[in-house]
Amino acid sequence: MNIYKWLNIRKIILIGILIDIALLECFIIFSNDFIFGSYSKQFKTITNIDANILFLFSWIFLSYICERYSNIENISLKNHFKRNIIKSLITSSIIFIIFIIIGLIFKTNSIIFELNKVSSFISLSTFVQYLISKVSSFFSDKKINYLVIYDENFSEILISFLNEMNHIKNYSFTLFNKSIIQKNHEELIIAKKNINELEEKVCNEFLSKKKKISRLTEWCEFKLNLIPPEILKTFEFDHSSFQIKKIGLEMRIKRIFDILISLCLLISTFPVLIIVALMIRIEDGGPIFYSQFRSGFKSINFRIYKLRSMHTKAEQDGVQWAKAKDKRITKIGSFIRKTRIDELPQLINVLKGEMSLIGPRPERPEIDKELSFQIPCYNMRYLVKPGLSGWAQVNFPYGASVEDSIKKLSYDLFYIKNYSIWLDILIFFKTIKIIFNGKGATPKNGQT
């Protein structure tokens, strides 16, 4: 995968992280060992870890998890500033607790924050993150005008897609025709397989002015990090670009990480599983586990097990979509769904090789059959092993309709085409962030 594709769209996060690193370094240089003062050397002697380095990694990781670096859309800068203060306080509180625990483990009282320095750093970091958001907002207000060369036979599909993009204030699209003057268009998008002589002339004009030219699917990948199936099927279907090598260094590394992380998670969460299992049994006396068949690699069915989160008669009327405020979900079920604890038994499927930690979420065969008739390119999501989490899960809320399934497939197609270890690592950390913030575990309000 071209790492730049997803690094570019996350440049605000990267800038925020780099600025925090620079600020911490400045405090360490000019503030006498920064956080811990004269206790820093004693801490390093006891734990063999530099206290400031531990603080640095903890601060950056928890800031990412708490979404301090995220430039949340549709909120005012004033509210963004308040939000950042709250997130900073939460982050610093968690770090303070971590260092207290370390102090208790190593039986030392030397883990002492110098509160005036901590407060100064947090205040400065919060203010700088606010400035980044303000500058980002100023540049994001600038509209980018696109000229679109398209195939008139498929104009209805294209116009529908572009209308959907119109709610994004950065984008303005103009469909090409002979009377169009290209002076005010910054970029050119090609939404057809073959261009004619006049359209080729337009392309040459854009090239001569060093303006960017993209295929429609390329634009979707770079700007949206997804590939809409209807766009792929209609304008640019290249099956070879979605082929993943079954044997290769990256796939071997992926399998090794699947096994190691799954074993670690199973061992570390075993006490939690026991407690939750007892609570499920106590609540309604029903079975602890719930099994289903799911579609796997190459659409081969396999059985998964989940901790039961719904009442025992949840599907007495047949298979149905989950919905917002679903009355079939038990009280403990609501908690384990939000924290994803109900998915932990699927780590066994990962160890068996039926699933991976990262990949498109496997769907039920009954629903798959329905969706494959309604959604183009749907079965392409099974060109790779399904996963516990995936690109669709960390970018789109819980899907509970055909329309949602189309959106999720858009992200799955992006993942398959751009697969890499780096993308898996990104999804892994985004999954942790989503679990911590309790997002995406239930359908949106109004979904059916």
Image (cartoon, grey):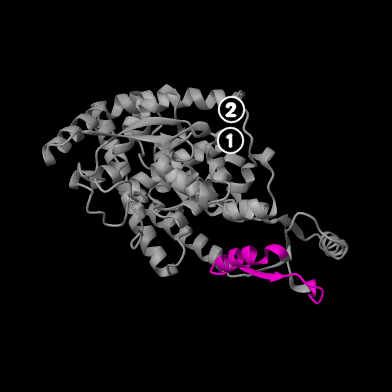
- Indicate the quadrant where residue 262 lies: top left
Helix, strand or loop at label 2? It is: helix
Residue 71 as seen in the image, left or right of residue 108: right
Q: Amino acid at mark 1?
A: Ser
Q: Amino acid at mark 2?
A: Glu
Q: Is residue 183 above or below residue 371?
A: below
Q: Can you identify the residue that label 2 sits on?
A: 250
> Which residue is at a point 66% across and 55% down the rendered structure image?
234
- Indicate the quadrant where residue 207 lies: bottom right
Residue 36 as seen in the image, left or right of residue 57: left
Q: Can you identify the residue that label 1 sits on?
A: 420
Helix, strand or loop at label 1? It is: loop
- Residue 183 is covered by the magenta coloring: no
Magenta region: 153-182
Q: Which mark is residue 82?
A: none
Is residue 150 in sight in this rendering? no
- Residue 176 is covered by the magenta coloring: yes
Residue toward you, 405 or 76: 405
> Which residue is at a point 48% across and 59% down the rendered structure image?
71
Q: Which quadrant is home to the N terminus?
A: top right
Q: Position of residue 315 (x, y in %)?
A: 26, 45
Q: Is residue 160 above or below residue 226?
A: below
